Every structure is written in structure tokens, then in C-alpha cells.
Image (cartoon, helix red, strand yellow):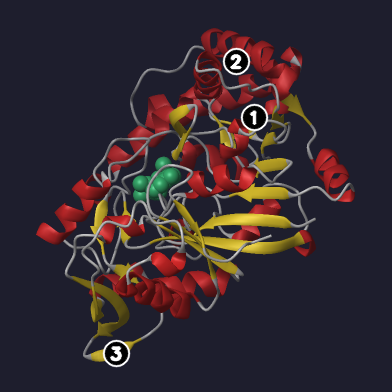
Amino acid sequence: MPVIAVIGAQWGDEGKGKVVDLLAEKTKIVVRFSGGDNAGHTVVNPYGEFGLHLIPSGIFSSGVTCIIGNGMVINPAVLIDEIDQLNQRGVDTSRLVISDRAHLVMPYHLLLDGLEEKSRGGKALGTTKKGIGPAFADKAARLGIRTSDLLDKEVLLERLRSILDYKNTILTKVYRVSPLSFNEVYNQYCQYGERLAPYIRETTIMLEEALARGELVLLEGAQGTLLDPDFGTYPYTTSSSPLAGGGCLGSGVSPTRINHILGVFKAYCTRVGSGPMPTELKDDTGDLIRERAHEYGTTTGRPRRCGWFDAVAARFSTRINGFTGAAITRLDILDTFPHLKICVGYKLDGKTIDYFPSSVATLEKCQPIYEELPGWQTPITDIRQFEQLPVEARQYVSKLEEIISSPVNLICVGPRREQTIDKMPIL
Ligand code: IMP
């Protein structure tokens, strides 16, 4: 049985949660492999509507083991709250597993995320202020505390003492704010450890065993390709890799095991936070998309920047992920527009380019070149067969298929599970 990676192909918020929730019904294990509670995966199913931040979107399917992978950073308070909320709403979380290699978001990470953003002034990155960047920076600097450290209070004590001394020096000397109390942080994280211990374990063995049994494993990405720290609009990126390659590193599944890489594309573009976005519409059309689609961050509530589909960015995303198929989400949001635009190239210093520049300074100068397509101007939310879509909608999807150079497997025409067109089966 295959491994399928579900990857955000734009700037995040493409609707990966719904796609994973749908595919999870056929899956045995779902692993979230990157990011932390900066993500907000919206799932609407018979249990209700949920905004998951840390727990994989497969949690609603019985018999599916959901792994919080080693590539994630976990704020334990948020995770415990998420578990409690799911339980209160009748969702069983006994199949949740936390990798013992995942890192923890600590109180100083939250503080530093806010302080660093403030110190950037007008050049703030627009982070979610969930401590994600500082937590991944500590992972790279070998200053991280991992979930396995929660399982041994002596180990936690040793590790926290030296790290907190250093962090308190930065808090007091660089940012001139009060230090954190060792006892408070230590006692709090001991309590988190007691609560989360039953979930924490080594996860590569269980993945290997599942694959040996021929079970389907799904790698659930967070954020989107254009927020990747290497290939995204650096420095306006997140701090862990949302790419298919990141799926291997963040889960412990070998690249040779991945058979399908499903790129999730919204039928238009959105971005939240700062950084260039060539097709952003700062006009009534952009506002209309935002209001029709309720494009406000699941995690922060911030209004998302909206714009037309960017084929230049999409081709780049396809190249660095190697998509074998695509899911097009939120096609119904375009129902009312008489004309639709797709950005097919950029105008840069009087020349036309068709590649996604690596420098943000260059990208900021790029002006979109649009191709216009007719809209369908009729509701499609009740359509379940591709052939029944209006011809203009089929043309729009075919155009995207051509850009992405891989087949469109799924089309979402509304938030609910059943509001999906299975254009071409993935399995
Ligand atoms: P951070 O990941 O909180 O450090 O934020 C860095 C950038 O990534 C900011 O522009 C955020 O708005 C963006 N970002 C982080 N997580 C998400 C997400 O789940 N969806 C969309 N944008 C995100």
C-alpha cells in the first residue's frame, strides 16, 4: 500500500484539513510532519466544525492512528486543550501518538516570538506569535527540549536549568523584560509531561510495521510550499519545511516509500502575514473573495490577502514537490464572477519572466500578466460529478491541470465532506 503526502501548494490555508479528513477514511496512519499550532486545519464532518492546530486531521476516522511527527513543535497547553475539546465533542483521541523526538514550544519561545516581531518594526514578518520560529531556531541550535525529556523529571530539570538561564539572560539583557521563573516553568512542564506521557513514544517502528503490513500511510503537511524556509519568500516564511521532502524528515518515512504527492491548491490565492504576493487584489474583487470565502485566519483571525490564481508560483511549487496529482479546493467561491483571471507570467523591468524569483526584492517588483477566462456564474456547491460542472468551470479546472502538469484528483465545492467531486481516484 502506498504512502500519500498531502502538501500545501501555495501560502497555506489551501484546505488540506478537508482533503486529509476525506482520505483518512481509507488510511491506517496519518502523520503531521511539520509546523506547530501556527497551523489551523479546518474540518467539517458529522461531528461538527473543527479548527485543528496540532492533532492530525485523521482523528475523526475510527481505526486511524494519528501521529504528531518528530518534525513538529508542540505547545503542550494547546495540545491538551485540543484533546479535551475533541473529547468533549465526542471524538475519540485514544489513537493519538506523539513522537518522542518532537520538540516543545516553551514559554520563552512565545515571549521571544512577540518581542522579535516588535523589534522588527515595519519589517515584521507577521508571524502567528505561537513561538514557532524561536522553537525551530532552538532545535537547530541544539537548545531544544523534546517530548521525550518530559518523561524523565531529572532530565527535564537538567536541560531546562541551563537553557532557561540562557533565555533569561536574553529576555532581561536584550529585551529588558522580566525573567521567567524556573520553578513555575519546571512544575508546569512536569504536569504537562504527566498528562501527555501515555501518548509519547517512538514512532518510526510503528510506521515501518504499518508499511510492512501493507497499510496506507498519509503524511499531512502544514502551511504551504511558498512559506518554506528554503524555497518560499524568505524571510517571509515559516521555519519548518512544508514540502513533500519535509514529509520524510518530519515523519521518518523514507523518500522511496512515497508513491503519491498530492498538491492542494486553492482555486485562487490567499496569503496571511507579510511578504510579496504578486496577484494580491487590494480592491473590491479581493474583498469579495475574502467575504464570500470567509478568508480569515483559523489560528489568528487575521484577514487573509486574496488574489487570482498564480500559475508561475504553481509551476514552481509543482517543480520542487513533484506533485503526482492535485486537489483543487474552494472552486465554488468563484461562482459569481463574470470573468476569472490566471496569472501566467510576471512583468519584471519591462521583460516577461515565467519563473518564480528567489529574492523577495525582485518578486515585489513583479507585475502579474493575466489570462482571462469566462466565469460560470451559477452555483456549483451541489454538483458531485465533474461532467455536470458548467463548461466554464471545467475549462478553468483543465487550465489549472495544464499548469500543474498533473491530474486533478479532487475538486472541493464546499466545506462539507460530501461537497467533493472525485474527478480521478487517487487510489
Ligand atoms: P510563523 O510560522 O508563526 O513563524 O509565521 C511565519 C509566516 O507564516 C507568517 O506569514 C504566517 O502568517 C505564516 N503562516 C504560518 N502558519 C500558517 C498557516 O497555517 N497558514 C497560513 N500562513 C501561515
The residue to which callout 1 is attached is 145
Label 3 or label 1, whichever lies nearer to me, is 3
The residue to which callout 3 is attached is 352
Who is closer to the viewer here, 220 or 352? 220
Please report contact status of discs 1 and 2: CB closer than 8 Å, yes or no: yes
Kindly give the residue lying farthest to the front in the view shown. 388
* SS assignment at label 1: loop
Q: Quadrant of residue 416?
A: top left
Residue 330, position as x, y percentages in the image: 36, 55
Instruction: Answer above or below: position of 81 versus 173.
Output: above
Q: Quadrant of residue 320?
A: bottom right
Amino acid type indicated by mark 2: Tyr
Residue 58 visible? The answer is: yes
Residue 328, position as x, y percentages in the image: 44, 61
The residue to which callout 2 is attached is 189
Q: Mark 2: few, some, or many residues within 10 Å (few <14, many ≥20)?
A: many
| Residue at position x 58%, y 61% in the image | 262
Question: How far is the residue under mark 1 from the one under mark 2?
Answer: 11 Å
Who is closer to the viewer here, 420 or 401? 420
Label 2 or label 3, whichever lies nearer to me, is 3
Residue 140, position as x, y percentages in the image: 61, 46
Image side of residue 97 versus residue 386, left or right: right
